[in-house]
Amino acid sequence: MTNPTAFIAPRTGKLIMRWLLFAILVAFALFYLIPLFVMITTSLKSLDEIRAGNLVALPVSVTFDAWRTAWASACSGIQCEGLRPYFWNSVLLTVPAVAISTLLGAVNGYVIAQWKFRGANLIFSLMLFGCFIPFQVVLLPMARTLGILGLAGTIPGLVFVHVIYGIGFTTLFFRNYYVTIPVELVKAAKVDGAGFFRIYWSIFLPLSLPILMVTVIWQFTQIWNDFLFGVSFSQAGTQPVTVALNNIVNSTTGVKEYNVNMAAAIIAAFPTLFVYAVAGKYFIRGLTAGSVKG
Amino acid sequence: MSKWLEHNIPRILLAPSFAAVVVFVYGFIAWTAWVSLTRSRLLPKYEIEGFIQYERLFAAPRWDTAMENLFIFGILFIVVSMILGLLLAILLDQQIRIEGALRTIYLYPMALSMIVTGTSWKWIMNPGLGIEAMVRGWGFENFSFDWIIDPDKAIYAVVVAAIWQASGFVMALFLAGLRSVDTEIIKAARVDGIPTWRIYLSIVIPSMAPIFLSAFIILAHLAIKSFDLVIALTGGGPGYSTDLPATYMYAMAFSRGDIGQAASSAMVMMAVVFAIIVPYLYSELRVKND
């Protein structure tokens, strides 16, 4: 009754298709992975091996010299202290900036979503709009303002800038999350005599962990990776790690030490890569927030 | 008193952020707009002189290059990222067992700083020791890949790195969209024997129109703001062949000491962003308020 070849043929056809599909997907995975792979292997080679060898070859003799140099003694311009001080600058500016902007976003989002007053929607629209301006349009007046405030070229100055221009996004995140919590819940709590803070503390805060994660990770990634504000509003000694990395790589003095550049790039990228590896789910949710569901 | 406080707490708490936005976003935009109409050079002047800065801007060959580059870069970056993102999303949507791992790999560049991306690709694309040297080492002596040092092609090197960074993100957007398409319709189409490619072409993709719009807006926004990538990858060079409006503005503001040019170029950038984003935001907010 059944013809065995007619039965097998579509199955092998399907199998070939599956393997083809798989091969294409893996090829793309390689496309995304190769730069990271090249960065890591280059950072573990000596300069001689880099000059003699091949871009994608594994290191013949592994050496961590480039990492030591990148961390502690690579030169950017006249300073030769490696990335270390700048890495700590980034930590010192990112931690408070993330904390303050997230806190403000939570409060704003709570008010806009659940304690509407006349004009609250307009305020929200104005804030939302602020998320989309190209920051070039505020660079000049901000430079002058920081000067007037005595914050020019300081880390608190950078914290201030990141908080100001982060509020829009953090408010958006929390607002969109808190509007999904039924108003009836708040009404019932009000009838029971609970006030603004009580309701937040006992109803909203316990529900906030996911959006807190999304917001903190989003802000952390944005601020750690920032270059524009960092390069515009810092001075020698207060530069964040991205600016220092760029200075080391484009330093014109001496021999180009590609292995040191790659080690420095990995060091600068490590914190955000680490966060992505352990909490990628929240990172993706932050990226797609507001764009898929509106 | 406490009753009044109780009633006004929401307003009081929102006030500082609102004030900050009014001053540091809208006030600053107004300041930049004002200065763009003056003869400011090293220091800002406040006597309005009309559109001289814009006339200078549009007459500057360097600005011409920057706008032309934005056009080339923007179009290629957006189109290729969307095609690649959609393709990857559809391929990943075929019940792949290692989907989670692949998704993680496709998307990780988005967690990197553009400076890191630029540094990495600068090394890979450098003709002396990068891809060119590697392929020549394999015996193809005439192989040439020197985009990064060729004034006519350097902008395409920037495009490659930008696509590498953002296409995985577009994939994630589209994949989320694919997953939200009504599975009943697809099942019904399958039962009717409609081939998979037709299902995608006539049912799935059209129903994702809003996501195409979102992806376009986000990518266009990224393209206009691109600054770090160019700085790290080419430094705007060779010459100023890879200048974008963002790098032009920065050069005028912080190394040329030409505040008038910096302000007017920033205003043009904002006009471009708003031309794309205002209609989108307007429709979004209107839908939400209904």
Image (cartoon, coloured by chain):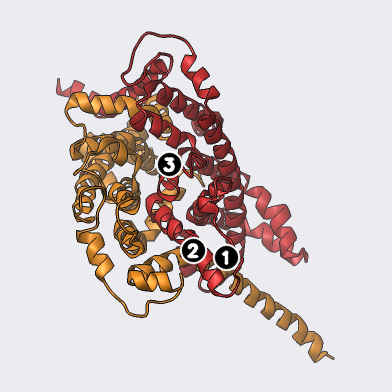
Chain colours: A orange, B red
Give the residue number, with chain letter if any, for mark 3.
Answer: B227
Give the residue number, with chain letter if any, for mark 2.
Answer: A32
Q: Measuring 28% from the left and 42% from the top, which residue is drawn there?
A: A102
Q: Image check: A292 left or right of A71?
A: right
Above or below, comparing residue A2 to residue A183 in the picture: below
Q: Amino acid at mark 1?
A: Leu
Q: Image check: B167 left or right of B108?
A: right
Residue count near mark 3 (Cα–Cα under 10 Å), binned few <14, some 14–19, many ≥20: many
A192 or B10: nearer the viewer: B10
Q: Amino acid at mark 2?
A: Tyr
From mark 2 to mark 3, how far is it between C-alphas?
A: 22 Å
Residue count near mark 2 (Cα–Cα under 10 Å), binned few <14, some 14–19, many ≥20: many
Q: Amino acid at mark 3?
A: Phe
Q: Chain of mark 3?
A: B
From mark 2 to mark 1, how far is it between C-alphas?
A: 15 Å
Q: Chain of mark 1?
A: B
Disc with the residue nearer the chain's start (3 vs 1):
1
Q: Measuring 22% from the left and 50% from the top, which residue is drawn there?
A: A86
Residue A112 at x, y percent in the picture: 35, 32
In the picture, the disc for residue B238 is: none
B226 or A162: nearer the viewer: B226
Q: Secondary structure at mark 1?
A: helix
Q: Secondary structure at mark 3?
A: loop
Residue A35 at x, y percent in the picture: 45, 64
A121 or A65: nearer the viewer: A65
Residue B231 at x, y percent in the picture: 41, 45
Q: Nearer the viewer, mark 3 or mark 1?
A: 3
Give the residue number, with chain letter if any, for mark 1.
Answer: B92
The quarter of the picture where residue A44 lies is: bottom left
Is residue B37 visible to the viewer in this orientation of the structure?
yes
Q: Measuring 22% from the left and 39% from the top, which residue is drawn there?
A: A235
From mark 3 to mark 1, how far is it between C-alphas?
A: 32 Å
